[in-house]
Image: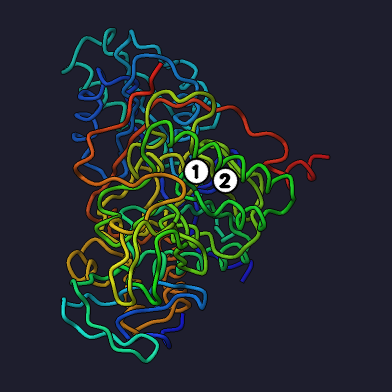
Amino acid sequence: MSAAAATADFLQLHPKDNVLICARSVPAGSSVTIEGQAYTLEVAIELGHKIARVPLARGDLVYRYGAPIGVMTADAKPGQHVHSHNLTSRYLPAHDRTATGPKVPSA
Amino acid sequence: MNAQIVGNGFHRADGRKGIRNNLLVIYLVECAHHVARMIVNQANDPAVQLVGFPGCYPNPYAYRVMTQLATHPNVGGALIVSLGCESFNRTGLAKAIAASGRPVETLVIQQVGGTRSTIAAGAAAVARLKVAAGQVARVPMTLQDLVVGTICGGSDGTSGITANPAVGRCFDRLVAAGATCIFEETGELIGCQQVMASRAVTPELGSEIEAAVAKAERYYATLGYGSFAAGNAEGGLTTQEEKSLGAYSKSGDSPISGLIKPGDVPPGPGLYLMDVVPDGEVRFGFPNISDNAEIVELIASGCHLILFTTGRGSVVGSAISPVIKVCANPETYDRIAEDMDVNAGRILRNRATLDEVGAEIFEQVCAVCAGRESLSETLGHQEFILTYKQFDPVGPACLPLAARRSA
């Protein structure tokens, strides 16, 4: 686990990763240094959440643990939150508490 | 190391050794649930435990899992409570328990005379069964006698960094010492199939593993949901494959010796993957409706204890086998430390390494084998779920080492 690329609150888990993982919840407006550049967090980032390490474009694969975890559906700048609003699975959709239940297979 | 004695096991007739000597009260249909629960309540003994099956329709999977549970090394005897008209094969179950050398009695409510009569008869039966189950011989137990399962529940963005790889370290140490380890939920390994297949002891087993994950993907796609709960996203996980990669690290780095299905007991030591997604067309709903359904399946395949990792924070335990909970998230640990056996989240606060937490989990495995209660045991957790499923038997490519031994 190398955190060389970021401040102690954000971890780069693998050299290939283009996102950083939050190791301690930080409020909006905090400064984060990524690869020597300072960025201001636009939103609070909670423990376990991801921010972009490099500029990400719609269609880019996102890497964590050195492996792809999905594809970007919108662009993100370094330091911006990467989550369900801009990242989606290549396998199965995720859901939240507004979900109403399984689809009934059509005949 | 290889001969490290971890405790005095309960010696069973099939050669397996238990770390607990529980007595099961088994209801065979929901209609018998209340009577069975009252029998357990009256016993007022944490070793007298309630398990059961709610359905009235027959199901070969449920019958097999229940038979494996009732003859599990942690179980010393059983009282079967039947309403009388349900389809569950109560005589077959009783015969299988008796054939395993365990004391067993059956009460059929429609014959005994109703609620009060059956509870009274059950209390007397439990007293007799406890005496009979107490006759079991104690023998030294080593890590080579031990089967350990792992599951994650309430995963978040920290699970794959702390608790899961720490359990993986513990699994590597257990496998090296000759123990048997099982990880599971092919639906939570979608995205890991290729790397997992590359760890299989034969290419044919690797193909079976890839096929099992492809089956899981089809099954969940038909249902419209992956194995991904709302809390996973709140904890920072965004996609199924991100959750999968974190979950996968629980398996450690040992070669994968086989692919089993619920109720299959691994034929020898090593690391096994359990395929929990039903075979055939989608029926009976979601493969596992909650974490305890998976825990029950791991126990049915012989697990003496379960390593349960959580990020969001779970409080569950299980009937039959102790559950050791490993908390991935340091903020969660601060909130609900009273339920967490291991604080793996301190890795994120630079207060421990993965190796140190892996060693701590290993020590807890040994201590719980030796008789110390896990926190969920102390707190009285004995959750249990068994529902309808459908499986075909595994093919010979799934257990290459067993095939080689019998050849």
Residue beneath disc 2: B16
Q: Residue at x 59, y 65 (%)?
A: B253
Same chain shared by disc 1 and disc 2: yes
Q: Which secondary structure lies at badge 1?
A: loop
Q: Nearer the viewer, residue A64 or B331?
A: A64
Chain of the residue on which disc 1 is drawn: B
Q: Residue at x 50, y 23 (%)?
A: B281
Location of residue B13 in the rendering, given as x and y in whole percent from the top left corner = 58, 38
Snapshot quadrant of residue B394: top right
Chain of the residue on which disc 2 is drawn: B
Location of residue B170 in the rendering, given as x and y in whole percent from the top left corner = 50, 67
From the viewer's perspective, is B231 left or right of B215?
Answer: left
Residue B240 in sight here:
yes
Q: Residue at x 27, y 8 (%)?
A: B110
Q: Disc 1 vs disc 2: Cβ atoms closer than 8 Å?
A: yes
Q: Residue at x 34, y 30 (%)?
A: B128
Residue beneath disc 1: B73
Q: Nearer the viewer, residue B389 or B212?
A: B212
Quadrant location, the C terminus of chain B: top right
Does residue A106 sit above or below A42 in this rendering? above
Location of residue B335 in the rendering, given as x and y in whole percent from the top left corner = 17, 67
| Mark toward the start of the polypeptide (1 vs 2) | 2
